């Protein structure tokens, strides 16, 4: 089978295609013909060595975290009815390969028939992180929540989930994505590329911030504007708030089996919409990572196999 490797900490330059032996089927195996993986900042930040403090890894390694594909074969201890089913899952030892050997039952989820595999795949590293943030922040209808990176793979789900929870949402986006973020349901959409301090004075004061981008300068600017604030970051482990009555927390926890089932059901019931910026052939991994890193995204980029 083919796989995508990160050979060293040189970032995009260190990506390469390789050939590996097909996996051997064990009693717990679910063999999945991979069709899509989400392109996550998690991958290219790891490849640059930027996450060594929270994700120490040894290179070379197969990249990728989540996948979506079709089950081709199962081991004797797995559900035989999975064969032929569309599934999404998490592969901690690397998902960027043409064949996945999923051996941990809680990390594999059946996709409802009325949900496309592409849409379901965006939940891994996108909808799951957004749901975790909503749960971790104890969001309720009285909250006014400021969201950074509202147009991204996490932010698009986060805005939708916050609105479903009844919160008022102040969303930050680039000038090219303002109209797009409004379609997600945000109550206020601010352009972080122009005088953000003045824009913040013209909207209600948030009591919570959920950060999906991890930019110290942006968090500092936001923190300076308010006396009390609860800041939750999904992207940066350390930040010192500017005011004594502000609180900062970093979190990247799991939503568990129930969380993924809830998100898949919400896609099936049209309570949530997946947003896919682009699909790239897996051979174009370097371009996909470049666009993920340098572009102002509208949802998630997918690699297709």
Image: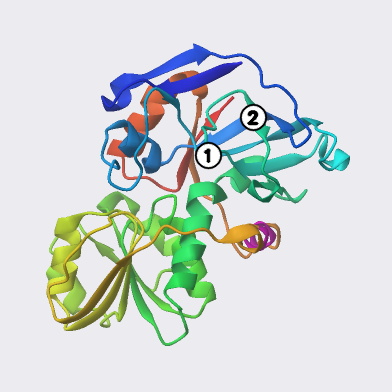
Instruction: Say if 248 sits above or below 236 in the image.
Output: below
Name the residue: 70% across, 49% down: 115
Q: Name the quarter where the N terminus is drawn.
A: top right
Q: Name the residue under label 2.
A: 100
Quarter location, residue 222:
bottom left
Q: Which colour scheme is used?
A: rainbow
Magenta: main secondary structure equals helix
Instruction: Say if 274 sits above or below 13 in the image.
Output: below
**Residue 263 in magenta?**
yes
Name the residue: 70% across, 57% down: 268
**Quick check: 124 left or right of 60?**
right
Name the residue: 85% across, 35% down: 76
**Quick check: 210 left or right of 246?**
right
Instruction: Say if 120 sits above or below 267 in the image.
Output: above
Residue 184 visible here: no
Q: Mark 1 points at which residue?
A: 92
Helix, strand or loop under label 1: loop
Whether pointer 2 and pointer 1 mark residues with C-beta atoms closer than 8 Å, the reply is no
Q: Where is residue 112 in the image (x, y as percent from the top left)?
A: 75, 51
Q: Position of residue 210 (x, y in %)?
A: 34, 67
Helix, strand or loop under label 2: strand
Q: Where is residue 274 in the image (x, y as percent from the top left)?
A: 55, 52
Please report the bounds of the magenta region as a residue range. 261-267
Dot 2, crowdedness within 10 Å: few (<14), some or many (≥20)?
many
Q: Where is residue 244 in the image (x, y as percent from the top left)?
A: 14, 81
Name the residue: 62% across, 43% down: 89
């Amino acid at each position: 089978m083919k796989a995508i490797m990160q050979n060293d900490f040189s970032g995009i330059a260190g990506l390469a295609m390789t050939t590996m032996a097909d996996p051997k089927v064990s009693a717990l195996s679910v063999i999945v013909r991979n069709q899509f993986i989400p392109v996550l900042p998690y991958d290219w930040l790891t490849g640059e060595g930027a996450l060594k403090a929270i994700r120490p890894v040894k290179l070379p390694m197969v990249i990728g975290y989540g996948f979506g594909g079709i089950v081709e074969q199962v081991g004797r201890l797995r559900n035989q009815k999975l064969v032929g089913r569309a599934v999404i899952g998490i592969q901690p030892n690397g998902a960027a390969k043409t064949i996945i050997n999923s051996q941990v039952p809680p990390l594999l989820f059946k996709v409802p028939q009325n949900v496309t595999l592409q849409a379901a795949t965006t939940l891994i590293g996108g909808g799951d992180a957004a749901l975790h943030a909503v749960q971790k922040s104890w969001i309720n209808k009285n909250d006014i929540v400021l969201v950074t990176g509202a147009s991204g793979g996490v932010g698009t789900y986060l805005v939708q989930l916050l609105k479903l929870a009844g919160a008022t949402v102040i969303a930050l986006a680039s000038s090219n994505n303002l109209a797009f973020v409004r379609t997600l349901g945000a109550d206020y959409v601010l352009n972080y590329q122009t005088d953000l301090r003045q824009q913040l004075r013209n909207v209600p004061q948030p009591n919570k911030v959920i950060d999906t981008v991890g930019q110290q300068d942006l968090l500092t600017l936001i923190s300076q504007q308010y006396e009390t604030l609860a800041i939750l970051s999904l992207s940066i482990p350390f930040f010192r708030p500017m005011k004594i009555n502000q609180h900062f927390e970093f979190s990247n926890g799991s939503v568990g089996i129930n969380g993924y089932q809830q998100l898949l059901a919400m896609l099936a019931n049209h309570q949530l919409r997946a947003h896919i910026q682009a699909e790239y052939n897996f051979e174009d991994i370097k371009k996909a990572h470049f666009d993920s890193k340098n572009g102002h995204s509208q949802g998630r980029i997918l690699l297709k196999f």
